[in-house]
Amino acid sequence: MTNRYEITFDALKKRNEAAFIPFAVAGDPDPDKSEEIFRAYIDGGADILEIGYPFSDPIADGPVNQRASQRAIRNGMDHEKFFKLVKKLRSCSDIPVGILLYANTILHLGTDLFCRKAADAGIDSILVADMPPEESEVLQSSMEKYGIGRVFIVSELTPQDRIKYICSQVDSFVYVVSRLGATGTDLKFSDSISGTISRLKTVTDKPLAVGFGISSAEHVRKVTQCGADGVIVGSALVKNIELSYKNANFLDKLREQVFDYKTATRIR
């Protein structure tokens, strides 16, 4: 059965666009404001949502996203509120929704129960930042059972044979790390991403979404021009949330920011 990712990427390809994929941590700064933020992303033109599940020790995340997780946890985000939030978003939009989280979050609830609740909430894919495909057999079994797509990460240092293996395990999109290290904004665009995308395209036809260190509309434009099928912006948006969420016009400004990023994906 065709899934939401296939529909979205196929439609964007026909329009010669890349997908714009904004990220935020669920529950940051609080559950109600978080819902408004994701709705602003959708209204601003997001093609796909990437939602982070707050975690106490997010080792792949830089300081900006770490603080977002701390705010969300401090303000009561838990399994029940997380799935309730996603259900509300699903009721207002049919765009793909992926979640990024850490293994302990799933294990805490139980793999099968977590996947059942995720599917019921309308989640399309799961990316576990600290679980490579070799260690995810049990999780993948439950994801397949409930029709949830798989996303895994590759980088410029991933050997070619391993790229082939990882891509064979993906059925939503391949998360391509634009630079090494943790998540975070970076003023300098990575010179290696063009070569990484070209190398990936020789071994897979799966959609390639590039993230980590992408902060400006110009970065988004360059990644799109390098041949990416999707561009993920996280820390730049989360930092804006941290600094501005108390401002009266915050959501309007956030929609404008997302609109600018999305516009940059239309230039090949």
Image (cartoon, rainbow, N blue to C red):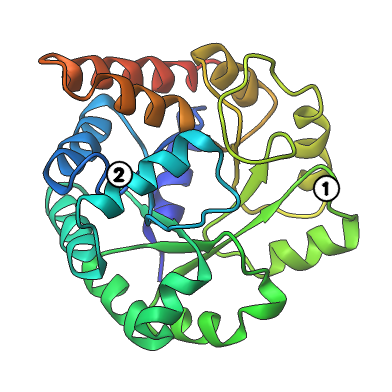
Quarter of image, res 47: top left
Quarter of the figure that contains the C terminus:
top right
- From what the image shows, is residue 100 above or below residue 45? below
Residue visible at 27% across and 42% down in the picture: 28
Residue 263 in picture, x, y percent from top left? 41, 16
**Left or right: 68 with respect to 250?**
right
Q: Secondary structure at mark 1?
A: loop
* Residue under label 2: 71
**Left or right: 168 with respect to 267?**
right
The disc placed on residue 202 is 1
Residue visible at 45% across and 25% down in the picture: 236
Does the rendering let one see residue 50?
no
Q: Amino acid at mark 1?
A: Thr
Q: Nearer the viewer, residue 204 or 60?
A: 60
Quarter of image, res 41: top left
Residue visible at 89% across and 63% down in the picture: 161
Residue 259 in picture, x, y percent from top left? 32, 19
Quarter of the figure that contains the N terminus:
bottom left
- From what the image shows, is residue 49 above or below residue 253? below
Distance of label 2 from label 1 (alpha carbons): 42 Å
- How many discs appear? 2
- Neighbor class of circle 2 (other Cα within 10 Å; few <14, some 14-19, many 20+) is some
Q: Amino acid at mark 2?
A: Arg
- Neighbor class of circle 1 (other Cα within 10 Å; few <14, some 14-19, many 20+) is few
Does the rendering let one see residue 47?
yes
Residue 216 in picture, x, y percent from top left? 51, 15
Q: Secondary structure at mark 2?
A: helix
